[in-house]
Image (cartoon, coloured by chain):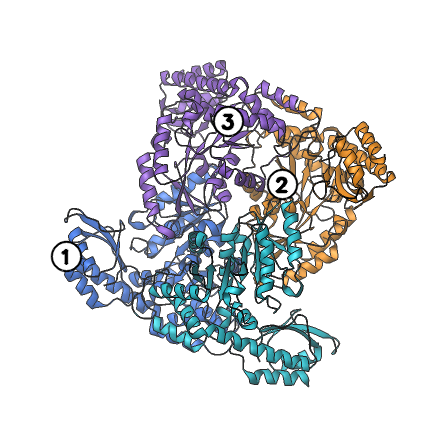
Chain colours: A orange, B cyan, C purple, D blue
C-alpha cells in the first residue's frame, strides 16, 4: 500500500532491457551516440516539431532550471503558481541557475494559474521600470501540483497573456505523460500549438530510472542550453544510458501506456475513497489525489502499513473524527490488490 | 510643489560644508581615514552598542543587499512584506547579492508584517526539509513602504518570532531617522533591544548627498561584510567623502532635526488633505502619504505644477469625481508655502 | 582500437546485474533507501574513516563542483594545476557553483602542483588583503590530467602547504581507483592521512554507468553539501540506482580490479609504443598516455580505424616525419588484441 | 611626501564648486536630471561618438564589472594581463557580476597584453568546445597596472586579434586621462577607432570625489547595462552629484590638465630617481613608477615620513645595500617641494 510518490516505483522491464542492450563496447560520449540522434528524430515526430531542439537530463529539477535559465534573464520575474515545484520543492535551484530570478506567485485556484491574475501582475511588475524585476517567463506545470490537468484550451489562455507581453512560456512536464493520458490531447496541442515555448517531458516518475527530456520548439537558444547543461554539471559522459531509457520510453508509446495505467489506478482509488466518504481538496484528474478523511481511518491505515503523505507532515493525536488531508499518488506499477486493501481499511 | 520623493531634495548646507572641510591634502583610502574611526565611535554611542560593526555605503540598495547577503545563505527564504523595497524596487539586487535567496512575501496589513502570518510561513517552509528554500532572515522596513511606523513593541513582536526559529532580523532603515522622530523612541529601542540584528541607517533621503550607514550589532560577520562590500564594488577609495557626510549628519543630531522637519511637513500636509476631503490608504505616520482624492483635483494640481506619484502611473481621462490614489513625500527641505499652495488648489 | 577516453567504455556486467536486482517494488527516494545506508558504511570502512560524510552524484563535474563549493567561499581563489579539469573542461562549472571563485593556476610540472610555487602564490594572494580574492581550497587531481600519479608523500607535501595557511584540500578522484592501483597505497594514505579534506571517488570512468562518490572526512559541512546538491539539481529521486551501482563497485573490490586492468592495459600499450619509438610528454603512470610519434604513423592508424585524441585536435597534412602528440586512454574493457594491432600498425 | 596612490588626493576646487552649484532645490533622481543629459552630449563629443551610451558610477570597480558583465556571458573566459586590476584587486567582483566568468591571464611583458599570446590562448580555449569556458571579452588597462601606456597602434593590434574571433574589447580607463596625456592621442584614437567596444573613463584618481564614466560605443546593450547597474546597487538616486562632478571634469578639459600635471610630476620624480641611481621595473610612462633602490634609502625615506607602497609590503631588516622595489604614484595635487625633498633624501 505505497502511495507516497510516483518517484519511488521501479523502472519498467523493457527499460532495463534497453539499458542492457546499450551496454556493448565503446560509444561516443556526451550525446554524440547514434541512439541520441535517433531519439531526437522520434521526439520531433511525437511533438510534430521538426525543428525542435531535444536534450536529456537525469532529474526533473535539472530539466526545469536549465530550461528556465535559458528562457529567463537574471533580473526576470518568473510567474508561477504559489505551490509550483520550482518555487517550493527545489531548494532555490531556479534562483541559482537563473542567476537570481524572482519566482512570483500568481493566484492559482485548483493549482492552475488564473490568466487574469497573471495579466494583472505582469502589468504591475512592468510598471516599476528599471527599478523592479522585469517580467519574464511564465511557468506552468501539467499535471499540476494539485493533481489537476490543464486542457489545451486552458494552456492557450495562459500563453495568450504571456504572448501579449512577449514573454516565453515553460511547461514543467514531470507528469506530462499523465496529462496527455488524462486529456487525450496530442502532445503538440498541449504545448507549442497552445503557445508553449519549451517543456520537460518527464520519464522518471513514469517507469524510467532517471531521465527527463527537454524540448525547445524554437532551436535558437539550443547552444546556450548546451553550455548551461555542461556548466550545470548535467552533461553525462556515458550519455548512452540516458538515450537508451528514453528510446524504450517512446517505443510503442510505452510512456502513454504507463501513464494511462497510473491514471487509471488513481481514478480507481479516488472513486473508492469518495464512496468511503473522503472529500477532495482538488479534483483528482490524473494519478494524484489530495483528500480528507477522519483521523481514525488515517491511524488504521498507517497501522496497516499504508504509506502516503499527510499534508501536515504527520497524523498526530486528537479527535478521531477530525478530517485530515493527505496526498496519495499512484504510479504505473500500482497494484489493484493494494488499492483494494487500502479502500477496505479506509471504509471500515 | 514637489512631493515626488525624499530622494530628490538637496543636501543640507552643513553637509556641504563638511565635504569642503574634508577636502584637504591626502587621506588614507578605503575607510582607513581618521574620520571613519571617529564616526564608528559616534554611531556606537548613538545606538548604545559599543561592539557594533559600522560601515558606510552610498546607496540604500547597497546597504540592504550587502547586509542581507551577509545574514542569508544562497538557499534562504527571506521573509518580507509583499511591497518591500527589496522585493519590488531593487531589480532583483537581493537575489543577486545573496546568490539566489527567495524573497517570500508575508501578509502585511498597513505595510507591517503580521507576526502570526510570519510564524505560519516559517513553519510551512521548514516543513519541506532539504527540498525547499530554507527559512532565513526576516526583513522589515521602518518607516514602512506605506508610510506607517513600527513601534519598538511591534518590532519586538516580529523579532520574537524570528528568534524562536533562530533567524536573524534585518531592518531597512532608509527612513529610520523618520521612524525615530515619529516614535520618539531611542535608536537602540527600535533595533537591537527589540531583537534587530543589523540595520541600515539612511542618510540619502534625509539631507545627505548619498550615504547610508550599515550597523551589525554582532560584529562576528564584519569581515565577511567587508569582503562582500569590496566584491560588490561598493568600497570607496576616497571614502573620506562618505565619512564626512555621515559625521555632519550625526553632529548635533542633525539627522533627527531633519527627519522631524520632514515628518512635521508630512503631518501638516496630511492634516490639510484630510480637511480637504482626501482619504488615506494607510495611516500617514511619518513623511509619506498614500491618499485618494478626485480626478478633477489631480488634474488641477498637475496643471499647477505639483509633482507626485499617482499609484497607477498617471492621471488619465475619466469621471472627474473618481477617487484616484497617489503617493506624496515630504523631505527636510519641504517649504510651507508650497504645501499651502498645494492644499489650496486641492480644496478649490 | 578505441583509446579516446575511459568514459566511453561499457559498464561491468556485475553492475548491470546490481541495477536489475535493485529494480523491485517501491524504494524510499532521495538516498533514504537501505542500500545507501549500507554503502555509507562500506565507504567509511574502505577509507578507514568512520565519521566521513558520503554522497553520490552522477557526473564527475557534479562531484567536483559541489564539493568545491562547499569548501570555498564565493570570493576564494582555488589553487589548481593549469590543466586541471575544473579549470579547462567544465565550462566554468566551478565558478558557477561557488558563486564566482577564481581558479588560480599553479606551476605543475608533470601535471603535479609544485608545493613551493603553491606556497608563493598563497602568500602573494594573501598580501592583497580585502582587495583581492582570498586564498581558498587547493584542488589536486589523482591520477593527474597528464597521466601521472601523486604518491601519498607528494600529496602530503601539498597538503602541508595548504594546512600552513589553514586552507582545505580537495582531491578530484575521477580516476582515484587508478591512482590506488598505481601506487599500491591504501585509500586512506592517499587522502585524509596525507591531509586531504574531501574527494570524489570516481566510478564512471571505471565500469559504472554514471556514479561518483563524494567523501568529506570531516562531516561538519555535510548538511551544506546536501543543500547544494539539491539546489544543484543533483539529488536523484530514484537514488537506489546510484547506490546499487556503487555497491557493486565496492563488492569484492571490483573498483580495484577494474582499475588494475586499465592500468595494466595502459602499461602494456606504453611499453609497446616506447619500443616502437614513441616519446612521452609525461611519464605514463596509470591508464593515460601522452605520446609523440610521426605523422605518417598517425595517418596509418587513423586509416585503420584507431580512435584517440591528437593534442592539436587533428592530424593535418605536413611532413610525414613530424612528431605529433596525442592522448590515449585505456579502460577496464580494453582488449589486448586491439592494443596489439595498434602497436603493429604503429611499428610498421 | 605622499606617493601611495592617486586615489588618496583631494578633489579639485572647481569640482567642489560644481557640487555646491548643483545643490539647489529638487532634482529628478536616477540620472533623469538635466545635467546628465548635457553631460551625455559632452562625452559623445569628446569621444567623437554621437551614438555612444554614457553612464556614471561611483567606483572604478563598479565601472569595470558592470561593463564586463554586459559584454561577457557567465561562461566566458575574459582575457587580461596577469596583474590586471580586475583579476588581482577587486576581490572577485568580475566573477561575481558576470555570474562566474573565468579571468584568463595572458603573457603581458611591460604590463601590456602580447597579441600573439592572446591569439594562441583564444585558439586553445576555443578548442575545448562546449566543455570549456568560451572565449569572451578581452580586457586591457590603459594606463597599465605597471605604469606603461598602450599607444593607439598597440591597442589596435590587440583589438584586431579580438575582432578576428568576434570578441569584444573592454578598456579599464581608471587612468585613461593619463594615457591620453601621455600619448597625446585623441580619446577616439585610443578607443573605438582602435577597436575598443567600451571603456571606463576614470575621474576618481584624477581630481573627482568619486565618479567614473562608462561609455559603450555601440548602444545596443545600453538597457542591459541599466538593469545591471540598478541590480548591482550602483544607480544613485541623487545622481545629480555624480553628473555635476563629471561636468566639472570635462569643462575646459580639466581632466586633461589634471592628468598632465600628474604625469609631469611622475616624470620629474622618475628623472630624479634615475639620477639618484634607482632602477625601473617598467618604463614609467605616466604617473606611476615601479623602481628599485637600496634598503638604506628606503629606511631613510620612511623615517622622514615618505608614504609609498613597497612591493613586498614592507621594508624589513637586512643588507642595507639590497635593492628593494616599490610603487610610487603622483597625482594632480603632487607638490614639487615634496618631490624635491623625497629625491634629496633618496640621493643622500
Query: Closer to the camera: disc 3 or disc 1?
Result: 3
Q: In which quarter of the image is residue A297?
A: top right
Instruction: Report, in whole angstroms, how far the alpha carbon at label 1 lies from the one at label 2.
Output: 68 Å
Query: Closer to the camera: disc 2 or disc 3?
Result: 3
User: Disc 1: which chain?
Assistant: D
Location of the C terminus of chain B by quadrant is: bottom right
- Residue B316 in view in this figure: no
Q: Quadrant of residue B329?
A: bottom right
Q: Where is residue A280 in the image (x, y as percent from the top left)?
A: 81, 44
- Asked if labels 2 and 1 touch by Cβ distance under 8 angstroms, the answer is no
Estimate how packed mark 3 is, as few (under 14), some (14 to 19) or many (20 or more) residues with alpha carbons within 10 Å. Answer: some
- Asked if labels 1 and 3 touch by Cβ distance under 8 angstroms, the answer is no
Q: Name the residue under label 2.
A: A61
Q: Name the residue under label 3.
A: C44
Instruction: Report, in whole angstroms, how far the alpha carbon at label 2 lies from the one at label 3.
Output: 30 Å
Q: Where is residue A302 in the image (x, y as percent from the top left)?
A: 75, 34
Q: Residue B170 carries which label?
A: none
Location of the N terminus of chain B by quadrant is: bottom right
* Image height of C253 relative to B129, above or below: above
Q: Which residue is drawn at 16% across and 55% down?
A: D297
Taking depth in this image into account, of B108 and A82 the one nearest to the observer is B108
- Where disc 2 sits, the SS reads helix
Q: Mark 1 points at which residue?
A: D276
* Image height of D47 relative to D82, above or below: below
Amino acid at each position: 500500500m505505497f502511495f507516497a510518490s510516483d518517484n519511488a516505483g521501479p523502472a519498467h522491464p523493457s527499460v532495463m532491457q534497453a539499458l542492457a542492450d546499450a551496454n556493448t563496447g565503446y560509444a561516443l560520449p556526451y550525446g554524440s551516440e547514434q541512439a541520441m540522434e535517433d531519439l531526437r528524430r522520434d521526439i520531433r515526430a511525437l511533438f510534430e516539431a521538426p525543428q525542435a531542439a531535444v536534450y536529456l537530463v537525469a532529474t526533473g529539477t535539472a530539466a526545469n532550471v536549465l530550461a528556465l535559465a535559458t528562457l529567463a534573464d537574471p533580473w526576470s520575474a518568473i510567474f508561477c503558481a504559489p505551490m509550483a515545484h520550482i518555487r517550493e520543492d527545489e531548494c532555490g535551484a531556479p534562483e541559482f541557475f537563473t542567476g537570481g530570478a524572482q519566482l512570483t506567485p500568481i493566484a492559482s485556484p485548483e493549482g492552475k494559474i488564473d490568466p487574469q491574475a497573471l495579466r494583472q501582475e505582469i502589468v504591475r511588475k512592468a510598471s516599476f521600470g528599471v527599478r523592479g524585476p522585469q517580467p519574464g517567463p511564465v511557468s506552468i506545470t501539467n499535471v499540476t501540483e494539485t493533481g489537476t490537468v490543464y486542457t489545451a484550451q486552458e494552456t492557450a489562455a495562459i500563453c495568450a497573456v504571456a504572448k501579449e507581453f512577449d514573454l516565453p512560456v515553460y511547461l514543467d512536464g514531470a507528469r506530462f505523460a499523465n496529462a496527455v493520458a488524462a486529456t487525450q490531447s496530442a502532445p503538440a496541442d498541449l504545448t507549442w500549438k497552445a503557445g508553449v515555448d519549451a517543456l520537460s517531458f518527464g520519464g522518471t516518475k513514469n517507469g524510467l530510472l532517471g531521465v527527463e527530456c527537454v524540448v525547445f520548439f524554437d532551436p535558437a537558444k539550443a547552444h546556450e542550453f548546451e553550455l548551461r547543461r555542461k556548466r550545470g554539471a548535467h552533461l553525462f559522459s556515458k550519455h548512452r544510458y540516458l538515450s537508451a531509457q528514453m528510446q524504450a520510453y517512446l517505443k510503442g508509446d510505452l510512456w502513454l501506456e504507463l501513464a494511462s495505467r497510473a491514471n487509471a489506478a488513481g481514478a480507481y482509488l479516488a472513486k473508492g475513497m469518495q464512496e468511503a466518504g473522503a472529500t477532495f481538496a482538488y479534483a483528482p484528474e490524473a494519478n494524484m489525489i489530495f483528500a480528507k478523511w477522519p483521523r481514525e481511518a488515517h491511524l488504521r491505515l498507517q497501522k496497516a502499513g499504508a504509506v502516503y503523505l499527510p499534508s501536515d507532515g504527520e497524523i498526530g493525536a486528537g479527535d478521531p473524527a477530525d478530517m485530515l488531508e493527505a496526498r496519495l499518488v499512484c504510479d504505473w506499477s500500482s497494484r489493484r490488490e493494494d488499492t483494494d486493501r487500502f479502500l477496505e481499511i479506509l471504509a471500515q
